[in-house]
Image (spheres, helix red, strand yellow):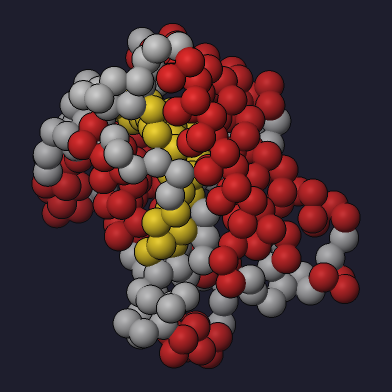
Amino acid sequence: MSNATLSAVDAQLRAGFKLEGRTALVTGGSRGIGAAISRSLASQGAIVAAGYSSNRERAEQFIEEMTRAGADASMHQGNVGEPEDCERVIREVIEQHGALDILVNNAGITEDRLVSKMSVDDWHKVLRVNLSGAFYMSKPALEHMLERGTGRIINISSIVGKMGNIGQANYAASKSGLFGLTMTMAREAAFALEKAGKLDDNGIGLTVNAVAPGFTETEMLETVPEKMLDKIRAQIPLRRLCRPDEVARVVHFLAADASSYITGQVWSVNGGMDM
């Protein structure tokens, strides 16, 4: 990593302290939108636990970059499509850092094919990671947060969950499913806190929200032909793709104590594409 790049990361990581003392777990947190979210949360003073699935070398490099820039960060391997892995990772983070204040369910995959050519395995593989994975991670995290009476869960959905997309029936269904999961968990969290006598007018609360990015400049789009990307840009009023940092800023806003009155909402970051 060059000195110039390190300085830029360092400047970002020192941007504020809205989340000082908080621990955040970001699934898929060492690449793409997840890496941007990890950096953004760290920039507000959070301890970041970055989840990854298989690329240990890349995760180690990312954590090294974060720590060299002054962030307090750790990495945690696990397959979000496996409930036992999810429970273990949540437990690891709590044991290592003392608590879990923020969970960002960001990990996601694609297996794109037309419905007529999509196999049952293609369908279930994407649903298992993108939708069931968010449930598997949220369940133990929510139990921990309810015990403490505070917390933030933020699900990363997609504009495709709102609008659909040719060749992405499985992905669209998984991302749309996150909307219902988000709203239900938000209602259940408020209900459980009230029942336990832990709703506090002046507290930071326990909120659950979703962020739905538009087409974003990440590795997922690297295989898309430029002509196709031009067609996508033409559908966006701002005529450009989303940047990972623009999604990350919304996530750290929702994670802040001052956002305690926002729950059960879907925040679109898509340049107006769904207007």
Residue at horizontal 54 percent and vertical 29 percent from the top:
188
Q: Is residue 90 left or right of residue 198?
A: right
Q: Is residue 137 left or right of residue 215?
A: right
Can residue 220 be seen here?
Answer: no
Can residue 37 be seen here?
Answer: yes
Q: Is residue 4 left or right of residue 271?
A: left
Which residue is at the front of the view, 241 or 68? 241
Residue at horizontal 38 percent and vertical 76 percent from the top:
272
Q: Quadrant of residue 15?
A: top left
Q: Could you tell me residue 166's position as x and y percent?
A: 69, 77
Which quarter of the figure is the C terminus placed in?
bottom left
Q: Could you tell me residue 213's position as x and y percent?
A: 44, 62
Which residue is at the front of the view, 83 or 60? 83
Q: Could you tell me residue 56's position as x and y percent?
A: 52, 35
Which residue is at the front of the view, 215 or 227? 215
Q: Could you tell me residue 17's position as x and y percent?
A: 13, 33
